[in-house]
Image (cartoon, rainbow, N blue to C red):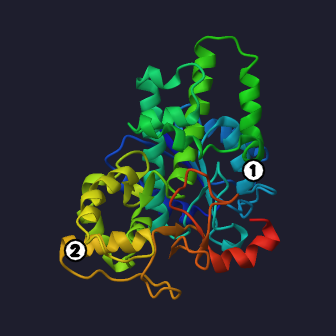
Amino acid sequence: MSFSILFIDDDEKVLDELVAATNTLLSGDTVDIRKWVPTGVDLDPLPVFNSKVDEGTILVVTDFDLTAGGTLGLFGSTIIGWCQAKLIPVGDYSRRNVGNLPLEPNPFELRVPNKTEQAAAYLANIFRGFRDIREQSATNASLLKAKRGPAAVLSEMLGAQTLENQLAQYNLRLSTSNATLLATIQRTVEQAEGDSAAVEKRLVTNYIVGHMLLNAVLRFPGPIISSQALCAYVGVGDSETAALCGFFEVAAYVGPFSGMGKFFWLHKLDEILAPLLDALPSDLAGDTGGEFHREALELHLNRKLARHRCARCAGMNGGFWCPFTQATVCQKAECSVASSGWIPQGATLCRIERDFYDEWSPIVGL
């Protein structure tokens, strides 16, 4: 099967720039790049859209406002709905009205950067991630055994079956995040068992697992953590990122979407840190895990490491990451608050920075 990406924008110049940049990054991949510039000729845009996607379409990329060419009432939100109905991952962006889109995507939506180079890099990695998931499910029949949930499928795809229970705590709530997907699942109940039902189940599973990994597991540090969260975990400043990535290279995560940045398996990091912590003096005083991790690394590396920028402790503590303020925090009550409704239970390295929590919790019920 050949794979494809569909780009949609009513500004052909912008569209061609993004397509060219993405195509360059995907030059080593087999992918059919498709374009659609909606115009007033497209009186009914849905048939046009349907003609440009098929079972091999891995990703759709759309601008927010698609009306400049004369197709009245056509917006990225419409494209997103059509894609969700077909179980096609979709990313949206805005060049003319950047403020129209929130920075964070919904669980089953992708937010594309609005700068061409950044967008191309993002889309190339998104395409490869969803393609890899689709290829794994097509070649590994055991992934779709009866009554296997997304966490079971994902843990096997990643070769991390022992982490299934923790990954299960990242499960996306279909009833509140994607009504179209829920309707699709309900529709499959009426299908007889056979090839069509198996294909539909594979599409649904791939769709859920891909978004769960990208928008939940990799976003909220737990079993897999980013390089930023790694710095927070060992209580050091961002300037030490390159050194830490090199030191912990054997713990690197290399699965789907790993091209989005540097990621690491937490349990492998702990295996590396364990003997270093054992080498610390037994009478060493410390308040937080981040402080002990940094002390252990400094002893092993025989040098001082840069402190992070927390004004509350002058960079002494740490150990956790706030995904909303992008800050290193520790478990002390004056610094952060434990996991809440905004953080999956499996995200064991996430806490909410105290000032942010106190400001917004009364308003949004954090």
In the image: residue 156, left or right of residue 240: right
Identity of the amino acid at label 1? Answer: Thr
Between marks 1 and 2 in the image, the one whose residue lies nearer the viewer:
2
Quarter containing the C terminus: bottom right
Q: Which mark is residue 61?
A: none
Q: Residue furthest front?
A: 283
Residue at 48%, 34% (x, y): give it. Answer: 134
Residue 200: percent from left, percent from top? 62, 25
Q: Are marks 1 and 2 in contact (CB under 8 Å)?
A: no
Q: Quadrant of residue 20?
A: bottom left
- Circle 1 residue: 78
Quarter containing the N terminus: top left
Q: Quadrant of residue 161?
A: top left
Residue 336: percent from left, percent from top? 60, 73
Question: Is 325 placed above or below 247 here?
Answer: below
Q: Residue furthest left?
A: 302
Residue 115: percent from left, percent from top? 51, 70
Nearer the observer, 140 or 318: 318
In the image: residue 259, left or right of residue 60: left
Q: Secondary structure at mark 2?
A: helix
Q: Which mark is residue 299?
A: 2
Residue at 53%, 86% (x, y): give it. Answer: 312
Dot 1 crowding, Cα within 10 Å, few <14, some 14–19, many 20+? some
Residue at 48%, 51% (x, y): give it. Answer: 126
